Each structure stands twice: as C-alpha cells, then as structure tokens.
Amino acid sequence: MVKGLIVLPLILLAQSSPAKNLGHYGAIFPVAEEDIREVVFKRLTEMQASGELKRHQDKVTARIAKNTLRPKPLGLTVTNHPTTYRVNPSMVVNQDIRLPNGELIAKAGTTINPFTQIHYSKTLIFFNGDDAAQVSWVKRHYQDYAFVKFILTGGDIKEAAKRFGRIYFDQGGLLSRKLEVQHVPAVVVQDGLDWKITEIGVNDV
C-alpha cells in the first residue's frame, strides 16, 4: 500500500510531462519494507533468547508487588497538640435513592446523615506503619476498643498484617480527607450523629 502511494504521484507526473531521456544516474535498488509485526516479533525473540525479556518482566513484577504491598504514603504527620473534634457525615445525594420495592427514601438534592439510620460499631485507627512509636502505641491500645479496623497511612501492608491481622491502606487519602484526619495516630468512632476524631499527641505515643 505504501509503495503504491509513492509510485502513484510519479506515474501522474510522468503522464503530464513531455517525454525526456533523463539518463542513468546509478544502480536502481528495490524498495524493501519489513512488516512492523515481523520487526516486533524478531525483537521479542532476540530479547527472549538473550534473557533480556525475562529480566524486564521480573522488574515489572517486582515493581507491581512493591507498589501493592507498600503504596505511596500519605505524608500525615504526628502532632504536639493532641485534639478531639467532630465531623458531620451528612452528604447531598445526587440521584434518587429507592428501596428494592421502589419506595423513595431520599430525593436527589436531599441532604442526609447516614447515622440517623445506621450505627457504625467499628473503631478506625489510622497510623503510619513505618513509625515504630506509632506501631507500639497501636499495639498497646487497640484492645481498648471492641471492634477495630486498622488503617495504614504509610508502611508495608504485609508487615503490618503480621502484627495486627487484616489491614486496610487509605489509598490516595480518601478516608482521611473525608474524616479530616491531619495527624496520626488517630482514632475515629461514631458518636451520636457525628464522627469523633481523636488525634494522639506525639508525647503520648
């Protein structure tokens, strides 16, 4: 197809020009075009034979495993000023919410507080698994609460799981932003119609 596109203008030019002997200016070589698929396949075959392909695959696998077990930390800091504050979980629904039987329970644009309908019994503990002092504080205090979810803001998920069991990582800081957590360790519980957040001071860790 490409050769056709190249030759066609030359043919048209020859048809519109008077015949002329242009002479001979060197050898004429055929145009050889290699299929791009053959080029790629040939390169992959060479990489496989040399071991380069496996080394590349191993690097990709290791990078994925590292990012999975150690996601990018959130950068939440410790604090010298322990504090407790409340966050209202109310939200504006962007579409009608209905029960399976079709009953409307919230119209689009309505502000609702989920704690008027449910009680969240678990305690969320946010901490940085790379900070030995924070890990030690969590080990000492997590049994003070009946049901705990451990939320990592940094560190190795596998290592934290060895100590505490099931671990959640606050990927991208979604939870900490919603709960307005700025410092760790922090303890989050439902208190009435609000979230109650307690940020632990560094002197207490």
Image (cartoon, rainbow, N blue to C red):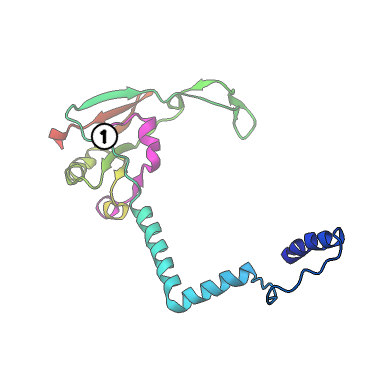
The residue positioned 52% from the left and 76% from the top of the image is 45
The residue positioned 52% from the left and 72% from the top of the image is 44
Q: Which kind of residue does numbered mark 1 sit on?
A: Ala
Image quadrant where residue 42 sits: bottom right
Assess whether residue 171 is covered by the magenta stretch: yes
Assess whether residue 182 is covered by the magenta stretch: yes
| Residue 132 vertical position relative to residue 185 in the rendered view, above or below | below
Q: Range of the magenta residues?
A: 161-183
Horizontal side, residue 125 vs residue 56: left or right: left
- Give 181 or 62, whichever is nearer the viewer: 62
| Residue 154 vertical position relative to residue 184 in the rendered view, above or below | below
The residue positioned 34% from the left and 29% from the top of the image is 180
Looking at the image, the residue that sits furthest to the top is 110
Horizontal side, residue 123 vs residue 100: left or right: left
The residue positioned 40% from the left and 67% from the top of the image is 58
Residue 18, x across and y down, in percent: 86, 61
The C terminus appears in which quarter of the rendering? top left
Residue under label 1, please give it.
186
